[in-house]
Amino acid sequence: MFCTFYESPIGFLEVAGTADAIVSVRFCESPGKQTDVCELIQRAVAQLGAYFAGELREFDLPLAPQGTAFQKRVWDYLLSIPYGRTVSYRQVAEALGNPAAIRAVGAANGANPIPIIIPCHRVVGSDGSLVGYGGGLWRKEWLLRHEGVLLL
């Protein structure tokens, strides 16, 4: 497992993975212990830098998030939400063929181990409200403003 830290406009991000796939991006208060870094981790950090600079709208990285089959279905759906767009938890549940699974979608969204790259910040309440974000609502708001979803 390889790990490095990236200082983003919304705080430090710990980027971890193998030589074959990114497995996690975590928000942290300060950088921790870095390991040797493989080419894929360097690529992930470069793409995060380009995203935060407004130069990248879609990540191109192999991902291997660990979770249940349902969580992985939710995360796969999140990858289809375009930059600058949002969907509601209800819309995700309906798209997955289970309109009653709104809370389960919310729980899977909250368990996303690769935020930003798997854009869980693009999921909002049915009324458009910013509800729930593992990195804190201020980060969700920042990311949506950055993508032009929310105006100043």
Image (tube, helix red, strand yellow):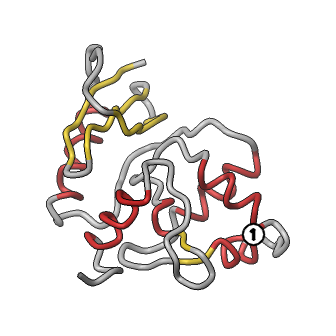
Q: Residue 147, image x and y in percent? A: 29, 73
The quadrant of the picture occupied by the C terminus is bottom left
Q: Is residue 101 left or right of residue 140?
A: right
**Left-right relation of 88 to 85:** right
Check the picture and name the quadrant holding the N terminus: top left
Where is residue 142 shown, x and y percent of the image?
30, 64
Q: Which residue, given by chain and number where applicable, does mark 1 sit on?
A: 96
Asked which quadrant contains residue 124, the reply is bottom right
How many numbered marks does the figure carry?
1
Would residue 119 be found to the left or right of residue 65 on screen? left
Q: Quadrant of residue 87?
A: bottom right
Residue 138: horizontal and vertical position, in percent? Answer: 36, 59
Image location (x, y in percent) of residue 151: 27, 84
Q: Residue at x 61, y 55 (%)?
A: 109
Left or right: where 50 falls relative to 66:
left
Q: Amino acid at mark 1?
A: Leu
- Residue drawn 62% across and 36% down? 66
Front-most of 45 and 33? 33
